[in-house]
Amino acid sequence: MTFNIRSQMPGVIWALALAVPVRASAADVVSIWGGARGTVVRKSDGTVWTWGANFSGKLGVGVSSTNLVRAMVPAEVHGSQDLGFFNSVSAIMGGEVHNVALKSDGTVWAWGNNMFCQLGNGSTNETHTPVQVNGLASVIALGGRGYHTLAIDSGGSVWGWGWNSSGAMRR
């Protein structure tokens, strides 16, 4: 919604854009993470939806979206290697330019920017669809922020990967 407001100065008109909240049906949304230029939602059917900035594939909407700068409406995260859609997700977490999901089988998946190895797949290559984090199984919880990711497994071990600025992943 945009309003034109006339100022006291003759001939000057200011345009004021207002962000009007839109109520979306949230009946199926069971968890949400927002901030760092984007939003991630997990629905009750185990699918993941994102919107916001798409830096380095942060939205996870596929390889063909490399020129998509941002999405203003929710888009479903594509499956690994851009096949189908991502599902069976039990938890979500977002970083500055990457997102992470915990699947119901205890595996962890990540996508987006990977300049600090925050995707945990042994490379620094960005991905536009989820890739499995190497060497983790039986994960029960996710954490992290910025450019690092954390996970807790069923044995109580805490795992961390990515940028260790200021000792964020101190042993």
Image (cartoon, rainbow, N blue to C red):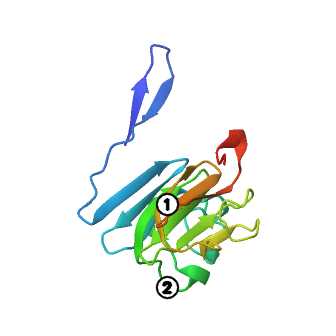
Is disc 1 placed on a helix, strand or loop? loop
- Disc 1 marks which amino acid? Gly
Residue lying at 71% horizontally and 43% vertically, measured from the top left: 165
Query: What percent of the width, then of the height, locates residue 34?
Result: 45, 50
Left or right of 158: which side holds 3?
left
Query: What percent of the width, then of the height, locates residue 159?
Result: 60, 59
Q: Is residue 9 above or below residue 14?
A: above
Which residue position holds label 1?
156
Q: Is residue 121 above or below residue 163?
A: below
Residue lying at 38% horizontally and 65% vertically, measured from the top left: 42
Q: Is residue 45 above or below residue 94?
A: below
Labels 1 & 2 near each other (Cβ < 8 A): no
Residue 86: image tag: none
Residue 84: image tag: 2
Mark 1 Cα-neighbour bin, 10 Å: few <14, some 14–19, many ≥20: few
Quarter of the figure that contains the N terminus = top left
Mark 1–mark 2 Cα distance, whole angstroms, equals: 33 Å
Query: What percent of the width, then of the height, locates residue 40?
Result: 45, 59
